[in-house]
């Protein structure tokens, strides 16, 4: 089958918290960059009236954008009218419904990838639904025993940072790190970087947990007891994972040169560095799922909603990553 005869990739975009910037950023991203992906069609999941209103507020001709075959709207009505910048728990289940629709479509094969605009966890919890985050919810809904959160920059040699643990209190991180768990995490990173990113032999650099990577046991034993044994087993499986390295020195160009991903032990060990380097153009990617999911590197930005001052760069990058990953997976 030639590239010209292939069916277009189907990309779903959930517009997230209706009081936040998700609806308008979706309109801005597609208006600015839909032509960048000629082999893709987009399904925008959200309330049709809300999307039209927010698009108008930021100067996007929504009727023109959705008037052809490239962009369509899958309407799900709001529970109550949404006001920019003002959260309402009545719409918590609406937000979750958008995500459910996207996941169900991707699992069924209707969508080749899903891109998620930011949501507000508190709104969903206030609606009576326990909710930790997109990553955990995607794992639960797809019955995936382990997923890996990875954030990535853009460019020819992007910085990628994956996490061994995600939304945990710092006091619980050490207990959550196990040899088997780290080995499985490394296997997921290696597998998905090969399949979805076209990297034949990914090189993964692994941080320690403690300052100075434990300093030979003087500052902690996790490196000796857990991380190093996991790396040894990974090497035996053909995974190029190296470390553990002190996190305070690893994120330098001379160490990152030739690396495809850094695996950090906890959320705030790796992500501050990546967000400092790439914020506004970074992409949040969930590895290990049976479906492709990417997202933005920022939150709902309630203070910017409806003003036209929010930057769609991260959402454009997330769409670009989803399309690229879908192309690679289709060609695998």
Image (cartoon, rainbow, N blue to C red):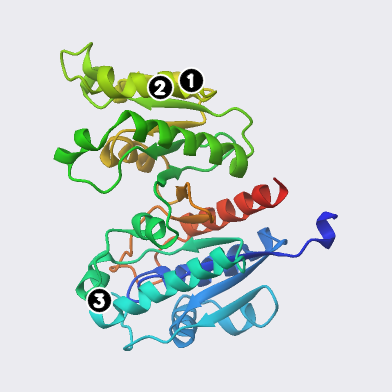
- Tell me residue 135's x, y (percent): 37, 54
Q: Which of marks 3 and 1 is nearer the N terminus?
A: 3
- Tell me residue 236's x, y (percent): 50, 19
Dots 3, 1 in contact, CB < 8 A: no
Q: Distance between the residues labelled 3 and 2?
A: 45 Å
Q: Would you name the residue on which mark 2 appears? A: 231
Left or right: 158 as drawn, with respect to 79: right
Q: Would you name the residue on which mark 1 appears? A: 235
Which residue is found at the position 41% from the left and 63% from the top?
A: 141
Which residue is found at the position 36% from the left and 79% from the top?
A: 94
Secondary structure type for disc 3: loop
Which quarter of the figure has residue 12? bottom right
Q: Would you name the residue on which mark 3 appears? A: 87
Residue positioned most to the top = 216
Secondary structure type for disc 2: helix
Residue 88's disc is none
- Tell me residue 305's x, y (percent): 35, 71
Which quarter of the figure has residue 124? bottom left
The reply to whether residue 318 is visible in this rendering is yes
- Tell me residue 224's x, y (percent): 27, 17
Q: How crowded is mark 1: few (under 14 residues within 10 Å), some or many (20 or more)?
A: some
């Amino acid at each position: 089958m030639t590239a010209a005869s292939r069916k277009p990739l189907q990309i779903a975009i959930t517009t997230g918290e209706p009081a936040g910037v998700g609806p308008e950023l979706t309109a801005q991203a597609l208006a600015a960059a839909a032509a960048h992906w000629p082999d893709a069609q987009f399904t925008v999941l959200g309330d049709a009236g809300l999307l039209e209103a927010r698009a108008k507020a930021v100067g996007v001709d929504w009727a023109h954008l959705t008037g052809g075959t490239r962009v369509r709207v899958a309407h799900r009505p709001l529970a109550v009218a949404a006001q920019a910048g003002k959260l309402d728990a009545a719409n918590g289940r609406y937000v979750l419904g958008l995500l459910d629709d996207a996941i169900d479509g991707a699992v069924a094969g209707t969508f080749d990838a899903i891109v998620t605009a930011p949501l507000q966890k508190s709104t969903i919890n206030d609606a009576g639904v326990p909710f930790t985050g997109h990553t955990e919810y995607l794992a639960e809904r797809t019955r995936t025993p382990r997923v890996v959160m990875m954030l990535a920059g853009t460019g020819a040699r992007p910085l990628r940072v994956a996490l061994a643990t995600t939304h945990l209190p710092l006091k619980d991180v050490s207990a959550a790190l196990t040899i088997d768990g780290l080995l499985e995490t490394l296997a997921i990173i290696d597998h998905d970087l090969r399949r979805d990113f076209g990297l034949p032999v990914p090189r993964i650099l692994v941080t320690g947990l403690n300052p100075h990577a434990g300093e030979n046991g003087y500052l902690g034993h996790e490196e000796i007891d857990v991380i190093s044994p996991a790396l040894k087993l990974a090497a035996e499986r053909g995974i190029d994972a190296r470390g553990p390295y002190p996190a305070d020195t690893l994120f330098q160009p001379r160490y990152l040169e030739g690396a495809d991903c850094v695996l950090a032990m906890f959320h705030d060990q790796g992500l501050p560095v990546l967000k400092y380097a790439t914020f506004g153009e970074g992409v949040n990617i969930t590895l290990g799922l049976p479906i492709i999911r990417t997202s933005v590197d920022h939150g709902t930005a309630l203070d910017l909603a409806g003003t036209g001052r929010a930057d769609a760069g991260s959402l454009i990058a997330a769409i670009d990553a989803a399309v690229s990953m879908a192309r690679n997976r289709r060609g695998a």
